[in-house]
Amino acid sequence: MTRLRALVALAALAVASGLMAIIPSTAASAAACAAPWQSSAVYTGGAQVSHNGRNYQAQWWTQSEAPPGTTGVWQDLGACGGTTTPPPSGSCTHPNWVAGTWYSTGAIVRYTNGLYYIAEHDNPGYDPIISTWYWEPYSCGGQPPTSPPPTNPGGFVVSEAQFNQMFPGRNSFYTYSGLVTALSAYSAFTRTGSATVQRQEAAAFLANVSHETGGLVHIVEQNTANYPHYCDPGQPYGCPAGQAAYYGRGPIQLSWNFNYNAAGNALGLPLLTNPWLVQTDAAVAWKTAIWYWMTQNGPGTMTAHNAMVTGAGFGQTIRSINGSIECNGGNPAQVQSRVTKYQQFVGILGVPAGANLYC
């Protein structure tokens, strides 16, 4: 046996016995990337797309839900193009955000929407697009923290003319300027994702507040008999403004002492002791509505904001606001009212309604 044949035989014996592994001369390359996913496109079962360096296959009809999504519609086919998460242009090397991981102030992560965020306060892995208290958009390697803002006041995706078209008979209390001022409370509101997604979120928010207030007509809850019911004396802070002081107010009809307390703490406002601010200050009223939209699941499983930016759909915003009463056949007429208004508003903003409109 020649020396070369002897070496081959010894190598084969080592592999068989588990003492040595065969190492390929070159690393396996990832699959080629399919056509990039587009939020406005409609995909049917079997369609393949690429998103953030991975290929996905649609399991059924879908539109606007970005892979990997939350409904199970996208099957992950693995990395494509040679890397699992290609970094954007520039020198960014920050890690992907991982839910449940502890992040200290100053930590920078790459979120699933491809943008970067910096931790403003220590947190146990909170979602970067939920609240500006914990995370702020971060410009990395020349990449802007969000998509370019429109030229409307405050960077809002809805112009004042469009707002007036949506609410031709609104109460003068609900000013456009008050809404624009309130945008500063949560920078991710209507500024996350593509231009289409941003406008869909704005339409969804305004459609729901329209339903809650009769077209932005009512500032306070109309059934005064309910007023004393919104005080939960079991809370450690009680009801310092009085038992009948925490009735529904504002675009989302904020009610209950615990909601006024939570919203006040988040917004830095004395709403527990002075809930009347919500019916006398337009910017405060709009801020409480945006606070609920961005931070509260309500009867649902996600915030209304997350429902729109992850592609879960308008139906999930209904569930987060009043799902225990309206969804699952509880009140289909009310659900239809919200959906109809949403379809009207996306038409004004020139974007498709997307999938999953009902709950």
Image (spheres, rainbow, N blue to C red):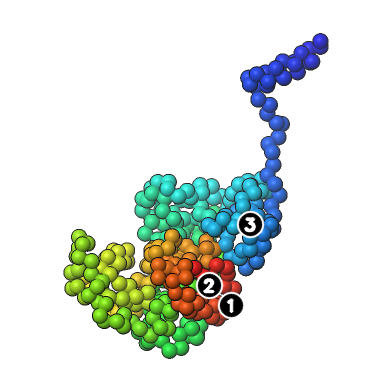
Position of residue 230 measured from the top left corner of the image (x, y, whole percent): 26, 71
Question: For the residues carrying marks 3 and 2, which lies nearer the camera in this image?
Answer: 3
Q: Secondary structure at mark 2?
A: helix
Q: Residues within 10 Å of mark 1 (few under 14, many from 20)?
A: few
Asked whether residue 153 appears in the rendered view, the answer is: no
Q: Secondary structure at mark 1?
A: loop
Question: Looking at this view, is 166 or 223 the one in front?
Answer: 223
Label 2: which residue? 199
Q: How dense is the environment of label 2, judged by Cα within 10 Å: few (below 14), some, or many (20 and up)? A: many
Disc number placed over residue 59 in the picture, else none: 3
Q: Position of residue 111 (x, y in %)?
A: 50, 54
**Residue marked by disc 1:** 350
Tell me which label, 1 or 3, sits earlier in the chain: 3
| Left or right of 347 in this view: 32 | right
Tell me: 205 left or right of 195: left
Secondary structure under tag 3 reads loop
Q: What type is the residue that disc 1 sits on?
A: Gly
| Cα distance between the residues tagged 3 and 2 | 26 Å
Residues 187 and 287: in front is 287
The answer to which of marks 3 and 2 sits earlier in the sequence is 3
Q: Residue at x 23, y 66 (%)?
A: 232
Residue 207 lies, with reference to residue 307, above or below; the image says: below
- Image location (x, y in percent) of residue 219: 33, 82
Q: Are marks 1 and 2 in contact (CB under 8 Å)?
A: yes
Q: CA distance from mark 1 to mark 2?
A: 8 Å
**Relative horizontal placement of residue 288, taking residue 190 as reference (left or right):** left
Farthest-out residue, right: 2
Identify the mark at residue 165; answer none if there is no mark: none
| Residue that lies at the very extreme toward the bottom in this rendered image | 169
Residue at x 61% of width, y 52% of height: 75
- Residue 57 in sight from this viewpoint: yes
- What amino acid is labelled 2 in the image? Arg
